[in-house]
Amino acid sequence: MMINSKRSLVFCIYLCITMPLLMFILTMFGRLLGAWLTWDINNKFPISMMDTLLCFKISLIGYPIGLIIWFFYYRNV
């Protein structure tokens, strides 16, 4: 039973927006850190548009994660 459905809906929207953004930032940071650690200064920096698209695809898992967090935790707040 939801106590305040408007507040609960705001939390759901908030989580579904911030979780993919957080996932994108974390995966992009990891890819950049890995590329920086393997980078040979004489060559071009080893990151491409495909790496960015991969991070975007991984960030899409944030939508279901946000819904799951909302369903099991914030729904009853």
Image (spheres, rainbow, N blue to C red):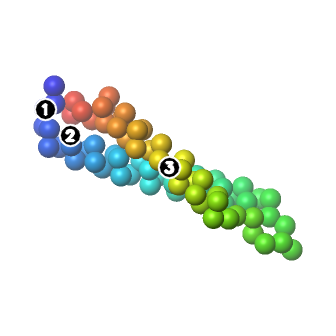
Residue appearing at x 80%, y 59% in the figure: 38
Mark 1 or 2 closer to N-term? 1
In percent of width and height, residue 41 lies at 83, 72
In percent of width and height, residue 40 lies at 84, 67
Using the rendered image of the protein, determine whether residue 55 is visible from the camera's viewpoint.
yes
Give the crowd class for mark 2: few <14, some 14-19, many >=20 residues within 10 Å.
some
| Number of the front mark, 3 or 2 | 3
Mark 3 or 1 closer to N-term? 1
Give the crowd class for mark 1: few <14, some 14-19, many >=20 residues within 10 Å.
few
Mark 3 to mark 2: distance in Å?
23 Å
The residue to which callout 2 is attached is: 8
- Height in image: 49 above or below 77? below
Is 62 situated left or right of 58 in this image? left
In front: 2, or 52?
Answer: 52
Using the rendered image of the protein, determine whether residue 26 is visible from the camera's viewpoint.
no
The numbered mark at residue 59 is 3
Q: Are marks 1 and 2 in contact (CB under 8 Å)?
A: yes
Callout 3: helix, strand or loop? helix
Mark 1 to mark 2: distance in Å?
8 Å
Question: Quick one: quadrant of the N terminus?
Answer: top left
Image quadrant of residue 52? bottom right
